[in-house]
Image (cartoon, rainbow, N blue to C red):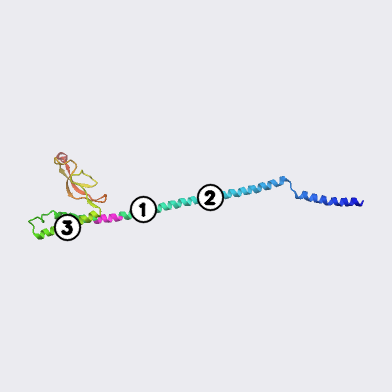
Amino acid sequence: MKKRREDKAAEEPREEQGAASEEQVLPAEELVPEKEEEEAGEESEVEVLQQELALLETQLQDMRDRYIRSVADLDNVRKRARRAIGDARKQAVAGLLLELLTLVDDFERALETKGAGDDAPEEARAVYQGVELIYRQLMGLLERRGVRAVEAMGQPFDPSRHEAVAQIPATDEQKEGTVALEMQKGYLYGDEVLRHSRVGVAVHEQEKDE
């Protein structure tokens, strides 16, 4: 009798331990949804990070493009500024050179006189030589600045360099449409016309009458 009570007392703790174990161990079906929720949450975070990264890359590329355009615009502004300054300087120099050409014309008219002939007084010859020396120095200065005379006599008439102010009857030696008379010299400043040559163009008498 006593033994049975002991056996029953021993079984009761084992039954309690089994019940507790059954309460602690959850079925596998109940664990699966929790795992899926965790994975879904991780995937959602990854997607958000990827979207943010893509947005940052787009913004970075946009900033790079803006920087490149800004550098290009600044370079264009600098080039235009240098070009404008260069043009302004060239125009200022051209204006001064154009005024000097009037002095050249005066010197050339003075040198066309007969004041330096052998029968001229010594003082007249000295003045003539002084004028000639100054003229040569002035022409040397203009040449160093890139000024040179336009070829006119005997050349085909070129409206970009010549200004026709008269029609000259063509001789047998002259070709029609060529420059037969130069009334005022023209000059170039570099590759640009500083002053057009004022010329007379050779034409046949019949065309002139028409």
- Residue located farthest toward the bottom when viewing the structure as drawn: 123
Main secondary structure along the magenta-highlighted residues: helix
Question: Helix or strand or loop: what does disc 2 sit on?
Answer: helix
Q: Earlier in the sequence, mark 1 or mark 2?
A: 2
What residue is pinned by disc 1? 79
Whole-number angstrom distance, CA of label 2 to CA of label 3: 79 Å
Q: Which residues are magenta?
A: 88-96
What residue is pinned by disc 2? 55
Is residue 80 toward the left or the right of residue 46 in the image? left
Query: Which residue is at the front of the view, 196 or 132?
Result: 132
Was residue 123 drawn as part of the magenta stretch in this picture?
Answer: no
Is residue 198 toward the left or the right of residue 35 in the image? left
Query: Which residue is at the front of the view, 1 or 173?
Result: 1
Q: Earlier in the sequence, mark 3 or mark 1?
A: 1
x, y (%) of residue 192?
A: 26, 50
Residue in view at x 30 percent, y 55 percent: 88
Tag of residue 149: none
Q: Amino acid at mark 1?
A: Lys
Question: Helix or strand or loop: what does disc 3 sit on?
Answer: helix
x, y (%) of residue 94?
A: 26, 54
x, y (%) of residue 158?
A: 22, 44
x, y (%) of residue 77?
A: 38, 53
Q: Amino acid at mark 3?
A: Leu
Number of labels in the image equals 3
Q: Amino acid at mark 2?
A: Leu
Q: Residues within 10 Å of mark 3 (few under 14, many from 20)?
A: few
What residue is pinned by disc 3? 133
Q: Earlier in the sequence, mark 2 or mark 3?
A: 2
